[in-house]
Image (cartoon, helix red, strand yellow):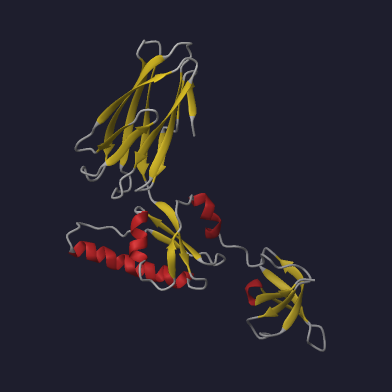
């Protein structure tokens, strides 16, 4: 989201949460509020808090002119870019940040920028911070194999962790932090991970695995799957059901009343010679028809 700092400059978000191996684009818009062409300069410096100092982040600026650096906590770099803006014109630059593929949870980069006009009439400074956190991605599966794929992926992730330990990785962490396989969603499971590019590698060879959906998923988009639906959800008065549990298993019935608080349903057996009302748990019913 771009925010206006003052009448001549706007910069995108200053606090960003992102996953590893992601490309972030932050717009920087500079308005020349004078009638004649003017020269501007943007200076960028970086600092880090990360588990492994050699891990590099990519930073670049794209526009009419461009600049690029790779920076790390062991060797933090800075860059400068000079450009001109025509009179009463707007110049939009793209600040590109490429997060490292091999980062760790909580690793962060602080990017300080300073934009000024060479004539000294305009100057603005600010900070953009990026913190690496786990992300959710979606895996495609064959319909009906969602749970099995989830279990196989979990098992393979532990084997992958053991293999990395054997090959010399100290204290390796499981690449798969959690797996969500919603009962009501067919053909997909959600995976929480720090390293999305590793999930496809681990899942390779799993029967029913069909690939990774490009892009991250916000937790808010899948949180409703984590809240169990009431057992009476989808049941309506007058619906015809089949009892799938209890002494009347296999009998057909019509819903006469629903107790949402107790999650119980009173049904009337329709094939009995004498109409018999029966109160059962909502889980013991399968909807056949609604009338």
Q: What residue occupies the far right of the structure in this picture?
A: 274
Q: Nearer the viewer, residue 286 or 217?
A: 217
Residue 59 visible to an observer of this rendering: yes
Left or right of residue 226: residue 17? left
Q: Quadrant of the C terminus?
A: bottom right
Q: What residue occupies the far bottom of the structure in this picture?
A: 273
Looking at the rendering, which quadrant does residue 132 occupy?
top left
The answer to whether residue 23 is above or below residue 116 is: below
- Locate residue 207, reporting x and y percent: 41, 73
Q: Nearer the viewer, residue 53 or 80?
A: 80
The answer to whether residue 100 is above or below residue 75 is: below
Looking at the rendering, which quadrant does residue 153 occupy?
bottom left
Residue located at (82% from left, 87% from top) = 274
All told, the count of numbered labels is 0
Residue 176 visible to an observer of this rendering: no
- Locate residue 268, reporting x and y percent: 77, 79
Residue located at (40% from left, 30% from top) = 63
The answer to whether residue 175 is above or below residue 149 is: above
Looking at the rendering, which quadrant does residue 282 occupy?
bottom right
Q: What residue occupies the far left of the structure in this picture?
A: 168
- Locate residue 75, reporting x and y percent: 20, 36
Residue located at (50% from left, 64% from top) = 188
- Locate residue 209, reporting x and y percent: 42, 68
Left or right of residue 216: residue 155? left
Q: Nearer the viewer, residue 130 or 75?
A: 75
Left or right of residue 201: residue 291? right
The answer to whether residue 152 is above or below residue 34 is: below
Residue located at (22% from left, 45% from top) = 52
Q: Nearer the viewer, residue 281 or 194?
A: 194
């Amino acid at each position: 989201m771009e925010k206006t700092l003052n009448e001549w400059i706007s910069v995108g978000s200053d606090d960003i949460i992102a996953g590893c191996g992601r490309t972030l684009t932050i717009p920087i818009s500079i308005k020349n509020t004078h009638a004649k062409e003017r020269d501007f300069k943007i200076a960028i410096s970086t600092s880090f808090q990360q588990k492994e100092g050699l891990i590099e982040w990519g930073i670049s600026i794209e526009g009419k002119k461009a600049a690029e650096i790779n920076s790390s906590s062991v060797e933090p770099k800075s860059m400068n870019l000079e450009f001109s803006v025509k009179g009463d014109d707007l110049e939009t630059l793209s600040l590109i940040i490429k997060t490292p593929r091999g980062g760790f949870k909580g690793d962060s980069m602080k990017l300080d920028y300073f934009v000024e006009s060479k004539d000294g009439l305009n100057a603005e400074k600010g900070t953009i911070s990026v913190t690496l956190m786990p992300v959710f991605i979606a895996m495609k599966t064959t319909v009906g194999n969602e749970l099995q794929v989830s279990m196989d992926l979990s098992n393979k992730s532990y084997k992958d962790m053991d293999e990395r330990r054997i090959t010399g990785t100290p204290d390796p962490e499981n690449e798969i932090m959690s797996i969500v396989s919603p009962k009501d969603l067919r053909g997909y499971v959600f995976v929480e991970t720090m390293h999305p590019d590793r999930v496809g590698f681990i899942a390779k060879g799993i029967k029913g695995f069909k690939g990774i959906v490009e892009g991250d998923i916000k937790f808010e988009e899948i949180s409703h799957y984590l809240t169990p639906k009431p057992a009476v959800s989808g049941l309506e008065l007058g619906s015809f059901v089949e009892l799938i549990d209890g002494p009347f298993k296999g009998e057909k019935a019509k819903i006469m009343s629903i107790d949402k608080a107790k999650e119980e349903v009173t049904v009337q057996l329709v094939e009995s010679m004498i109409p018999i009302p029966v109160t059962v748990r909502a889980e013991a019913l399968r909807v056949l028809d609604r009338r």
